[in-house]
Amino acid sequence: MADTPRKTLGLPVKTPGQVTAVNPRRKPLRAGGPKDKRKPLPGEVKPGAPASMRTSPAVSSAEPSPAAKRPTPSPRPPLETPIAVTTASPDGVRVSRLMSERGLCSRREADEYIVRGWVYVDGQRVSELGSRAAPGAKITLDKAAQASQQRQMTILLHKPVGYVSGQPEPGFKPAVQLILPENQQRSADTPIFHPSHLKGLAPAGRLDIDSTGLLVLTQDGRVARQLIGESSPIDKEYLVRVTGRLDAKGLALLNHGLSLDGKPLKPAKVEWLNADQLRFILNEGRKRQIRRMCELVGLKVIGLKRVRVGRVRLGDLPQGQWRYLREGEVF
């Protein structure tokens, strides 16, 4: 088919750079005018609409947003706040001291329990440090405090020579460094070591750096108080290897009659086991007491081992190893 010439529209040809003049008689389009074809937004009323369709800004006919449809959560009830009470006059005894004296816990633990609101004096909750009570006041612990005490661990360590039992001295290692998973003596019914068992773990009594044997470390203030202090009824047994001569009079003095630092020692039980070994049973723990006692009667200690604390024995626990205090095992 032959090519048909295209018809033109008769528009003027625009050359590059030419500006087209604007018709001065053309009216610009205005929003909302007769040529505004857009859909009004929710709540919007176009100009010129009847008055019945118009609403005030305070009362809108628009659909509420999803967030506005959500119900307003009711405020949570306030937590119960422990009431700080004092059951006696300011001349009473500190509650923490009474708790410690009665063996409920240590003074440090008592302060912690009081702050947490876990202590009741004559049935009233105490939560203020320094609170006082009558000496005969009834003190009970909340179940939370009892649960906390049940989680506290006591460890028995066979301490070697060269480790200090308490605060480390320059150049020496504390015995607590031996409480490692690989050093634990375990059986089927013993707990598994957890790092939390080291928190607050402290020796309940000292054992000299050049002595070996049973060292008790505990997180439980009740155990510590039971084993430490002049009022402790728990005795301890030692095997002591000595050199030197000891007559009957010297042996009698070891049992009773010696003083250290100007203060008489409590009666002890001391007897020969063999030609060079003595057994000591003491219920006090002065610093380097056995070594100083032996020096007073002409003996020199060349080996000292603690084999029993109360009713708990060292037994076959290897040196450098440790175990947990067993259920039902008491000092």
Image (cartoon, rainbow, N blue to C red):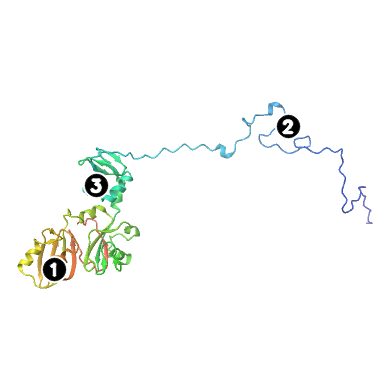
Relative to 236, residue 128 above or below: above
Q: Are marks 2 and 3 in contact (CB under 8 Å)?
A: no
Question: Residue beneath label 3, please?
Answer: 97
**Total marks drawn?**
3
Identified by mark 3, the residue type is Arg
Which callout, 1 or 3, points to the residue nearer the camera?
Answer: 1
Identified by mark 2, the residue type is Pro
> Which of the labelled discs sits on residue 295, or is there none?
1
Q: Which residue is more in the foreground, 103 or 259?
A: 259
Q: Which residue is more in the foreground, 28 or 327?
A: 28
Q: Position of residue 263 (x, y in %)?
A: 13, 58
Tell me where residue 154 sits by quadrant: bottom left
Q: Residue at x 15, y 66 (%)?
A: 292
> Which of the labelled discs sits on residue 47, or is there none?
2
The C terminus lies in which quarter of the figure? bottom left
The N terminus lies in which quarter of the figure? bottom right
Q: Residue at x 26, y 53 (%)?
A: 221
Tell me where residue 252 sits by quadrant: bottom left
